[in-house]
Each structure stands twice: as structure tokens, then as C-alpha cells.
Amino acid sequence: MILLTGFEPFDGDAANPSWAAVQAARDILRAEGLAVEAIELPCVFGESARVLRQEVVRLEPSLVICAGLAAGRDRLSLERVAINCDDARIPDNAGNRPVDEEVVAGAPAAYFSTLPVKAALRALQIAGIRAEVSQTAGTYVCNHVFYALMHQLATEAPGSRGGFIHVPREPAGEGQSGAPGGMPVRDMAEGIAVVVRTALATTGDLKLAAGAVY
């Protein structure tokens, strides 16, 4: 079983492309004969992690990929590390705005993704989909979910793998502003499907340069 997650809209947006993308990726992968479920997470500290945890317990997936929106980016970001820190610049959808709080009290400072991020990056490049390995998932609800997922897998389901992908905004429509360099949902979805296929086919990872100078 493969579990994909996206988020509900936040910060005044009418839609969140991460949710549209994982639904489309689910359909692509189901058409290939894979067992895939997709769920929409609330953009709320605490509640998002609780919903995800319940679904992981219920479905017992071997692979979990969560997705969220990074509006300022122009490509898929394969997140490398989740940190045990909530530090919200804006309130979540329930009005919560934690500052310098742990995602999981007393837990490790960070977890690395257990997806083959370098192999997935190479596969995305071959597929012609803009992508990068990202060294930070921020400190908002996306990182909160990413950290909660990796903590749960490490402590309760060590045989399962998981990680997080940030997606950009969609391109602006005619007469609309914003989202220069955005990505169509269909490309995001195919990119997520590429990452799933790569994870299923790859037990290790490639060693190639995809770091950051700053």
C-alpha cells in the first residue's frame, strides 16, 4: 500500500495544488496496478499530524509521500530533512501560531527522508520535470507533518519508508497575477508518480551532487 497526502488550502488561497497533484498521481499509479490511497490533511498544527498518524495506522503503507505547497519555488523540491521545530510566521487554519516549539517533545532534533532523493532527482531530470533536492522544509505545517511522519515510521513502522515533496504554484491563468515559473498540476502529479516508482525500484540511493552552497 502506498499513501499520498496533500493539504487543504491555507493563507486565503481557494485551492492547494498539492492536494490536486496527489489525487492525480494516485489515479496515474492506480492505472498501473498499484494500491494507492490519497488523503487531504488539514493545514493545522497538531491536527494534521494526528490525521496522518491515524491513516498510517489504518492502512499500514510501505511507502508514504506527503506533499505541500511552497509558493516561492518553481520546481518539485525533494525534501532531505525534517526538523523538530514549529516556528510559524503566519497562523494556521485554526489560528495557531506556535513559535520555537517541538513537533514531538523530547524526540530527536531531525530525521532524514528515507526516500531515495538523489535517484528520484535523476529520474525526474530524465523525465523532463523540474526538480531539486531541498535542504529545508521550513518550519510551518509542511515540516510539522514531515517530522511527525518520519518519527512515526522510525518508532512504529521501521519497515516503511517516507518523505516529503514541496510543489510550486500552478502557472497564472490569463488575466491573473502571480506564480511565474509555476508548474501544471499534471506535471506535478507525474513527478510524484516518478518518485513513487523510483522508491519502489530503489533500495539504496545514488551518490550525486545536489547540495546547496547557502
Image: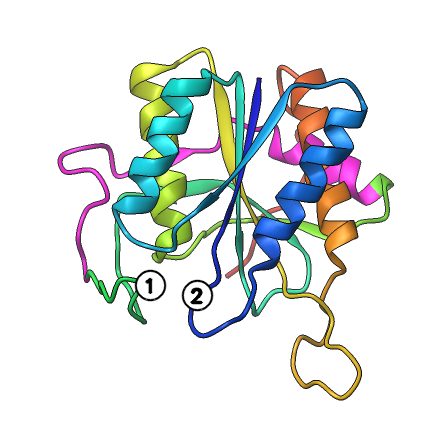
Is 175 or 135 nearer to us in this picture?
175
Tell me what residue is drawn at x 22 percent, y 65 percent: 97
In the rendered image, residue 105 lying in the magenta stretch gets the answer yes
Q: Is residue 60 above or below residue 166?
A: above
Residue 80, above or below 68: above
Q: SS for tag 1? A: loop
Which residue ends up furthest to the top in the rendered image?
Answer: 159
Mark 1 lies on residue = 93
First reached walking from the N terminus: tag 1 or tag 2:
2
Q: Nearer the viewer, residue 74 or 10?
A: 10
Residue 53 picture quarter = top left
The answer to whether residue 61 is magenta is: no
Q: Which residues are magenta?
A: 99-125
Which residue does the numbered mark 2 point to in the structure image?
Answer: 10
Image location of residue 74, percent across then percent down: 67, 64
**Side of 158 where 18 appears, left or right:** right
Q: Is residue 130 visible?
A: no
**Residue contact between numbered discs 1 and 2, judged by CB atoms under 8 Å:** yes
Hey, what amino acid is under mark 2?
Phe
Instruction: Give residue 120's position: percent from left, percent from top.
Output: 69, 34
